[in-house]
Amino acid sequence: MAEDQSVITDENFDSSQANDDKCIWTLDAAKTPHPRPTSFDQNLMFIEAWEHLRRSVVYYKGQAVGTMAALDNASGALNYDQVFVRDFVPSALAYLMKGELEIVKNFLLRTLHLQLSVKGIDRFALGQGLMSASFKFLHSFKVLHNPVRGVDTLIADFGETAIGRVSGVDSGFWWIILLHAYTRATGDHSLSHRPECQNGMKLILSVCLAEGFDTFPTLLCADGCGMADRRMGVYGYPIEIQALFFMALRCAVHLLQEDDGKELIMRIEKRLQALTYHMRSYFWLDFQQLNNIYRYKTEEYSHTAVNKFNVIPDSIPDWVFDFMPMKGGYFIANVSPARMDFRWFVLGNCVAILSSLATYNQSMAILDLIEERWGELVGKMPLKLSYPALDIHGWSIETGSDPKNTRWSFHNGGSWPGLLWLVTAACIKTGRPEIARKAIELAEQRLSKDGWQEYYDGKEGCYVGKQSRRLQTSSIAGYLVSKMLLEEPSHLGIIALEEDKKIKPTTITRSTTLPTKFRGYP
């Protein structure tokens, strides 16, 4: 039988690779090369959070390689003892802001090595560029002729054991974004310029930029491929994936070396132009655009069609008209032929702000919406992952009657304190930190007292989630990053991207889809 290549063992990884170059911590990147006395020194909750985060660290061959999903094993480990790529991002940012770089570097290299694993489900081989959603550490004592010495192993999950067997599309994007954050924090390009890192990025991008049957620049995805890793009716073109895709592409432009990646960079820049136009034009919803959609004509067959996706106005749910304020707006959950999913998803909208997918006016409108609909989107515990919750009929159809995603619970309208850092970063980027401060103060009333829960249930997020885990690392790290960003706003430069001047401003016209040769161009 062939050896399983989806693991890292002592025998197939050279540990010296993780330490053969110096990490340089620059003053320009973070302003705090060494920890200095701050208001945190007297903040017991902040100190407690750091203690829990350090306890969650996973070690492999004596090196810190990530943080496990949760420290609470009261209900059995399941997969909460694994290191998830998306969940490690706030942990990594906390360590970068504190000047502790090695764990982030080790994580990037280990996951990169796992990318080269042979992966497949049943008899189908998965794409080489796919990044694992998570990995776990295993120590085995079954060593021939030596019962004392064991073998350390990292076992990756590419979707083979996931619920529904769906691969995490977001993992590769988060990996590129985190590599970019590490490079900015250290001011050192030696890691990103390594051949294995350059190759890893190219493998991820080759999957995303491959030509297919699609007529849109967005990525077609299966349900459960992102943070909402169970059926939630987000199949198609979910905002979370599109925003992360955009941000990863922009980060890749800065990380790829031009000498052997010039053609790829040109493809990326061309895709960014199309993706920016598509998202700003068709995913954006404010009061005026809602009124336009409400008045759409249908069955338009021409290049000058206004209702290009043939959305039926009667399909607009009633709640949208009550939810949409005169001042505010957001990127809706999904747009595909004859279908608009008008739900709010906080992760995609915050990433749109941080990546500058959203224009300045759109960024301000998103925060206006959060302020105007504070009770619905924040409630008693920040923040709603999605809004509103699917009703009984929608829950039955979209989730397959999933008992974990019942109304106002988990991904279906549950409140996730682990997303606090994203909103804080978005608020600081738009010059409105008071919104973040208000949300953080709200979380501080219960988060530590409740044991750092994973999520909260209820329309206002009042109740600890039915299956929520205590000591959830993303909730702990999300809080730490939020506090550190407010204390030192310059840390925002690690993760946020400024507007790309090369991307043309978006103007919606009736004849956008008209072929070039029919628009008077030579």
Image (tube, rainbow, N blue to C red):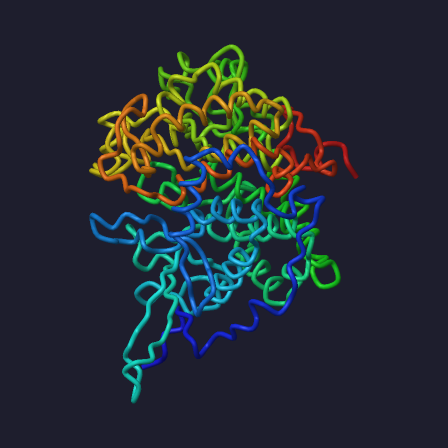
Query: Residue extending furthest bottom?
Result: 145
Q: Quadrant of residue 352?
A: top right
Seen in the picture, residue 321 relative to 104 is either above or below; the reply is: above
Q: Please identify the quadrant where the C terminus is shown.
A: top right
On screen, residue 252 versus residue 285, left or right, reads right
Residue at position x 45%, y 49% from top?
Answer: 88
Which residue is more in the foreground, 208 or 480?
A: 480
On screen, residue 438 versus residue 232, left or right, reads right
Which residue is more in the foreground, 479 or 79?
A: 479
Which residue is more in the foreground, 445 or 65?
A: 445
Q: In the rendering, at what x and y percent does residue 268 appear?
A: 65, 49
Q: In the rendering, at what x and y percent does residue 91 appear?
A: 47, 47
Q: Quadrant of residue 216?
A: top right
Q: In the rendering, at what x and y percent does residue 515 appear?
A: 66, 37
Which residue is more in the foreground, 426 or 145?
A: 145
Seen in the picture, residue 110 relative to 68 is either above or below; the reply is: below
Q: In the rendering, at what x and y percent does residue 265 appear?
A: 69, 53
Residue at position x 33%, y 80% from top?
Answer: 149
Seen in the picture, residue 368 relative to 348 is either above or below; the reply is: above
Query: Residue extending furthest right?
Result: 522
Instruction: Count every numbered label the image shows and give the total.
Output: 0
Seen in the picture, residue 399 relative to 59 is either above or below; the reply is: above
Q: Please identify the quadrant where the N terminus is shown.
A: bottom left
